[in-house]
Amino acid sequence: MINALGIVNFPNNAVKIKGMSEYRTIAAMSFLGRYRIIDFVLSNMVNSGITNIEVLVREQPRSLVEHLGSGTQYNINPKHGGIQMLYPDHQAVSDAYYHDMFLMNENLEVFRGSKRKYVVIAQSYMICSINFEDVIKAHEESGADITCVYGETKKGKTSFIGCKMPKLDKYGRIHEVNNNVGYDNKANILTETYVMKRELFLDLIEKSYEISPLFNFIDIIKHHLGTLNVRGYKYDGYLACVNTLEEYYRINMEFLNPETFAQLFKEGWPIYTKTNDSPPAFYSSTGHAKNCLIANGCVIEGDLQNCILGRGVHVEKGSVIKNALLLPNTYVGPYSHIEYTILDKHARVENQKEIIGTKDKVVYIKRRDRV
């Protein structure tokens, strides 16, 4: 157990997953059939020895509350910690004011009540495998006031759009932070993970409104780049950011590659999630699957290729589905043809027998829609 309080942050107001964000936060979205996106940051914290975790919740909490429950699935002994969700006590004047600093201010007493030496703030929509114990050790050795974790991408023109890019001097100190607008493929990307002493964290919150009530947390850090020792810590593992529908689809599907899968799911670093007591997937004599991830409780009577299926999906006889993402409890009727499509939870394909998207323009079918 390390002497740190974990804080799971939420994306800024501009980040929405088209269609899917109408029903749940990004943190609560299904991933690889059996996980939720928040499982990865929470597992990173628990595996690193962080047992006191606060989850900031901006809106649409129901799915997240159902998934997190008491938090026992994350292997935290309730005698030594737990997971708590934090909400605002007051309504923000407008969306421009409703950001992470507003929510941190609203829950200032919670952070004051913690006895942990450090805080580790990590972003819920970033998928990675970071050992925060290593980050804290590097933070202590460098003498930094704030350590910001960043990774390198070679997909900067198409992925991580809108994410923050740090500029570092030869000593590893960050002197500038800009938005990624897709100018170069190769770019350094902030994972929006920060380590600092709790006293400094409290001081930044308390003084944030004096600077600007519209500033979010990264804006506050940028404001202090000239007065605080803000350093970068390079993370070399798998990194992805779920900030658009296209990226949500692409990131899910790239895990059908075993090499990509092995980068995130590593021995000795389990990914915890809520368990579900359902039977194994059933394949009838007409059911076939090639290069697919299929969760428990599915019934497969058709042909699947390069697909990811959540729990309880039913694919009827004669159907052909390729390069598709079927979220839990979806249904595909007989003799349907589906390609490059996302079926949201409880969607049913009954009358429309052909739904064909492309790699660059995926079709999204809304939650509970019957088509």
Image: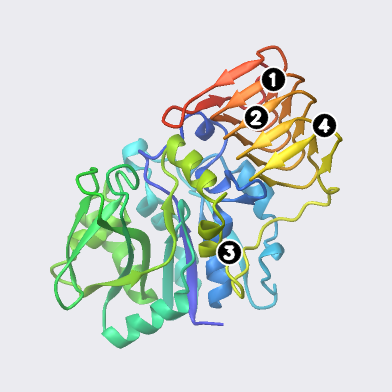
The reply to whether residue 54 is in sight is: no
Mark nearer the viewer, 2 or 3: 2
3D distance between C-alphas at marks 2 and 3: 26 Å
- Which residue in the structure is indicated by mark 3? 265
First reached walking from the N terminus: tag 2 or tag 1: 2
Residue 7: image x %, image y %? 47, 63
For label 4, the residue is 286
Q: CA distance from mark 3 to mark 1?
A: 33 Å
The spot of residue 195 in percent (x, y) is: 37, 72
**Vertical placement of residue 47 versus 67, above or below:** below
Badge 2 is on which residue? 321
**x and y, in percent, of residue 233 in the image:** 31, 72
The answer to whether residue 356 is seen in the rendering is yes
**Label 4: few (<14), some (14–19) or many (≥20) C-alpha neighbours in 10 Å:** few
Mark 1 crowdedness (10 Å alpha carbons): few <14, some 14-19, many ≥20: many
Q: Position of 253 compared to 126: left or right?
A: right
Q: 95 or 26: nearer the eye?
A: 26
Residue 331, compared with residue 328, is above or below; it is above
